[in-house]
Image (cartoon, rainbow, N blue to C red):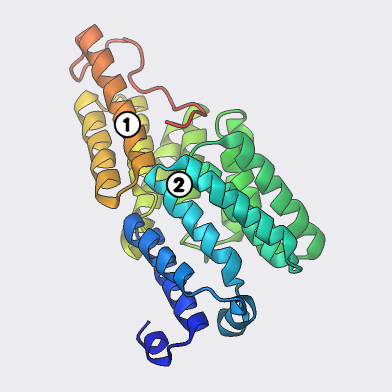
Amino acid sequence: MERAKQSGASAGLCVAHMMLSNLCVYTGKFATAEQATLEAARHLRADSRHESFSLSGMDITVHVPVARMHALSFRGDHAGADAYMQETLRLAEAQPQVGVLVWALFWSSFRCLIERDFERAGALAGRAMAFASEHGFGFWATASQASQGAALVIADPSRAAALIGDALAKLPGMLTWHPHFLCFEAEALLALGRIVEARGACDCALAMSASTALTWWDAELHRIRAAVIRAENGGDTAVREELARALAIAEQQGSGTFRRRAAADLDAMHAVVKRWGRNDSSDGSPELLPLPDADAR
């Protein structure tokens, strides 16, 4: 960033602010990421596409709306995120680089996964995978396979677990992406009754995020681990503590999307406890925490 400021070059400043934005997203600083993206957009110029390719190999004119899309999605402005997703796809389809289009489709699919819009997530991942396979982008084909699996977590958990597991095995070095896909894999495994494997996936993902400081998915991981603990008959207190941790992380990171989801699960738990008088018992009463469906809580 300092070198970019010293140079005063618009393209360099734009790329530097986008790099900061990406880092902030991965580390769960969503408000800061949004501000860095706005600053990057301020430095966009007519020749930014060419100069950004020279500096970083990326088309900054597409990268900026992708970053805006993700920041707004995490923060809970889904209508705003959708507008930037449409802008992303429009720009990606208008430019000549197939790799940029594949990249834009993949990250648009990811935005839909943040909001659990699984129908659109699967469709976009399918397009990304088709283009990537046709044009020899093996890495993006595999990444898109993982997104396709995540999009099936409710409709077909068996296929979801298989697709994600296979994709992650082919991407051992991409620890940045393992935690959130492991979260979806854990949810699928739990739906299949494979509770020990689901617990292992959650714990592995949280260990990865702790060792790398890439904590963008931690709130969801704790929320899903709460459901795993409930399936283990771990007791209402342990479940409540896990959900409270998910809520606290989401609030600290500024993720309205994840905060609302964790709060909804806590409210549902309190309602059932109040109805049944449950307190760390395993008496066969109804499940406190059914797995979330494909809504946009």
Nearer to me, 216 or 46: 46
**Of helix, strand and loop, which one carries label 1?**
helix
Q: Are marks 1 and 2 in contact (CB under 8 Å)?
A: no
Q: In the visual, does 144 lie left or right of 28?
A: right
Q: Residue 4's image quarter?
A: bottom left
Q: Residue furthest right?
A: 134
Amino acid type, mark 1:
Ile
Could you tell me which quadrant the C terminus lies in? Answer: top left
Q: What residue is shown with label 2?
A: 73
Which residue is farthest bottom? 7
- Could you give the CA–CA distance between mark 1 and mark 2, rounded to whole angstroms? 28 Å
The quadrant where residue 239 appears: top left
The residue carrying pointer 2 sits among few (fewer than 14), some (14 to 19) or many (20 or more) residues within 10 Å by Cα, namely many
Residue 2, image x, y percentages: 35, 86
Q: Quadrant of residue 260?
A: top left
Above or below, 297 relative to 202 = above
State the residue at coordinates (27%, 23%). Answer: 267
Residue 173 versus residue 12: which sits nearer the camera? 12
Residue count near mark 1 (Cα–Cα under 10 Å), binned few <14, some 14–19, many ≥20: many
Q: Which mark is residue 123?
A: none
Residue 154 in view (yes/no): yes
The image position of residue 117, as x and y in percent, is: 55, 36
Q: Is residue 161 visible?
A: no
Q: Residue at x 40, y 42 (%)?
A: 76
Q: Looking at the picture, does residue 252 appear above or below residue 276?
A: below
Q: Is residue 112 left or right of residue 138?
A: left
In the rendered view of the protein, which quadrant contains the N terminus?
A: bottom left
Residue nearest the viewer, comparing 273 with 78: 78
**Circle 2: residue type:** Ser
Secondary structure of the residue carrying numbered label 2: helix
Check disc 1 and report the residue beneath it: 229
